[in-house]
Image (tube, rainbow, N blue to C red):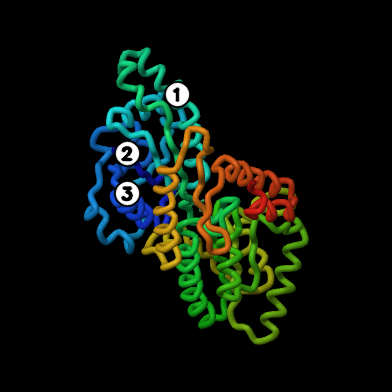
Amino acid sequence: KKKIAVMTSGGDSPGMNAAVRAVVRTGIHYGCDVYAVYEGYEGLLRGGEYLKKMAWEDVRGWLSEGGTLIGTARSMDFKQRWGRKQAAGNLISEGIDALIVCGGDGSLTGADLFRHEWPSLVEELVADGKFTQAQVDPFKHLTIVGLVGSIDNDMSGTDSTIGAYSSLERICEMVDYIDATAKSHSRAFVVEVMGRHCGWLALMAGIATGADYIFIPERASVKGKWEDELKEVCSRHKSKGRRNITVIVAEGALDNELNAISADDVKDVLVDLGLDTRVTILGHVQRGGTAVAHDRWLATLQGVDAVKAVLEATPETPSPLIGINENKIIRMPLVESVKLTGSVATAIEARDFDKAISLRDPEFIE
Ligand code: F6P
């Protein structure tokens, strides 16, 4: 009987529970045993009770739950080879040789490395006397399948990551609340949003709430010039009778000399313009709460496909990443997507924005 493990890793994102639910139930539907790894890679290292065999009813009601019910952790030990060896031993002990990981690019890169090292880790476990050759013979290869769970929507090759639209929804709701008080007092608000090195959340939230100005890593705000432009735009909007001013700043916003542009930097400029200004850093409210419908169906369809990908995998197939392109669920080589995601960061650092944007596009993945 095929045994599959599913885990969530890195920062939690709304929709991760829907993904785990889909994997558990699809796996059972296809006659597999499905294990949930609790606490991300930490749980893989600890083994035993952290690897729990899931029944159909164990995931009942999970579609509408926020966060990740099986836990997540940013494990330092899994980054070490000894940690991965221990994890391999724990999987073999349970008879598991397929792992579906829902996480960001760092977590997925770790998973792919684990797969590549697997044969030598298994050899070492035999040499260490942990297993006999006969015990490890059925576990020659580890199958890895990736699902992208992140609010940042920063993965190349997929139109949306699981959790991004929920976070966007939450941000818009919060900005609407802020706008109400801002209008009452004729104030300006600078709202900092998450997204790490990616401006998607800031850009989409800015468009959806009609913000006056948006700072994102992918647009060069020229040092010494953006201040004047910001003042000009806000003055223009004010002169048209707008009572409030809303500026959205992505946490990763940079100027053309790679200096961070913080919410406080922006506030200083607005104060200089004579505006009564407040800063709101939304923080982790952007990650909590229930998943919007988009993330629930995305996670469900991708979870189903992840199990199919496990069942169709051969030792030769590169580890697939399940994505979405133009409303179709697609598979692409995980390493390619991770590599392009890394190149986006490099392109942004080089202030080559056209390249950065094009590298996020799926057509670049073979
Ligand atoms: O990657 C998701 C994310 O929420 C980013 O937007 C943010 O920069 C980071 O995680 C925050 O990490 P932590 O929860 O560890 O503070």
Between circles 3 and 1, the one closer to the viewer is: 3
Residue depicted at 35% across the width and 16% down the height: 126
Residue contact at pointers 3 and 2, CB within 8 angstroms:
yes
Residue depicted at 52% across the width and 44% down the height: 105
Locate residue 208, reporting x and y percent.
Answer: 56, 73
Indicate the amino acid at tag 1.
Pro
Q: Nearer the viewer, residue 289 or 292?
A: 292
For label 1, the residue is 119
**Dot 3 lies on which element?**
loop
**Dot 1 lies on which element?**
helix
For label 3, the residue is 30
Looking at marks 3 and 1 on the same chain, the residue that comes earlier in the sequence is marked by: 3
For label 2, the residue is 2
- Residue 360 left/right relative to 139: right
Residue depicted at 23% across the width and 49% down the height: 55
- Residue 255 left/right relative to 172: right
Is any atom of residue 194 visible in this view?
no
Locate residue 98, reporting x and y percent.
Answer: 38, 37
Residue depicted at 64% across the width and 66% down the height: 214
What separation in Å lies between label 3 and label 1 (alpha carbons)?
A: 27 Å
Please tell me how crowded label 2 is: few (under 14), some (14-19), or many (20+) other residues with Cα within 10 Å: some
Indicate the amino acid at tag 2.
Lys
Looking at marks 3 and 2 on the same chain, the residue that comes earlier in the sequence is marked by: 2
Looking at marks 1 and 2 on the same chain, the residue that comes earlier in the sequence is marked by: 2
Indicate the amino acid at tag 3.
Tyr
What separation in Å lies between label 3 and label 2 (alpha carbons)?
A: 9 Å
Q: Is mark 1 within 8 Å of ligand 1?
A: no
**Dot 2 lies on which element?**
loop
Please tell me how crowded label 1 is: few (under 14), some (14-19), or many (20+) other residues with Cα within 10 Å: some
- Residue 68 left/right relative to 10: left
